[in-house]
Image: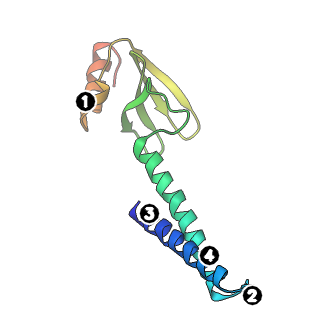
Amino acid sequence: MRFAFAITLLLISRAGYSAATETASSSMPNPLGSGAIIELVLGLVAVIGLILALAWLVRRLNVLPGQRGDMQVVAVLPLGQREKAVLIQVGEQQMLLGVSSSQVSLLEKFDTPVIEPRHAPQGAFANRLKEVMQQSGRKP
């Protein structure tokens, strides 16, 4: 962020310097001179820096379009190289999904939360899933 600010200040000062020298001289400036090339490069660097700074800001603030607060991934349990069990929270309901490389399947719906979404410690998902599956009479 500081880098983009420094580049912007450099461009503003450079533009002021260019305007002062153009008014002082009455001849046409050379379009392929070193000053024009430096201005072009600095302008490109400033635009790229601004794009990177805005991308970082959007990721940091988590304000991407299409994101909703009522659906989130609570926990993920890898089952193989390309298979995993994913517990998601949708509103007040949690759903256990089986995810493979070719499909997503609903394995179970839970009316009461299996794991609290905000307090899911690492490794707790596998243990809690075994408990819930044993309580419902299924073999884990």
* Dot 3 crowding, Cα within 10 Å, few <14, some 14–19, many 20+: some
- Residue 135 horizontal/vertical position (percent): 28, 14
* Dot 1 crowding, Cα within 10 Å, few <14, some 14–19, many 20+: few
Q: Report the Cα–Cα distance between label 4 and label 2.
A: 13 Å
Q: Earlier in the sequence, mark 1 or mark 3?
A: 3
- Residue 1 horizontal/vertical position (percent): 41, 59
- Residue 52 horizontal/vertical position (percent): 50, 59
Local SS, label 2: loop
Q: Earlier in the sequence, mark 1 or mark 4?
A: 4
Name the residue furthest right.
28
Q: Earlier in the sequence, mark 2 or mark 1?
A: 2
Q: Type of residue at label 1? A: His
Position of 33 relative to 23 (above/below): below
Q: Which mark is residue 49?
A: none
- The residue at the point 68 percent across, 88 percent down is 33
Give the side of residue 128 with respect to residue 44, left or right: left
Choose between 112 and 62: the one closer to the eye: 62
- The residue at the point 27 percent across, 31 percent down is 120
- The residue at the point 50 percent across, 66 percent down is 8
Give the residue pinned by disc 2: 27
Give the residue pinned by disc 4: 19
Q: Which mark is residue 5?
A: 3
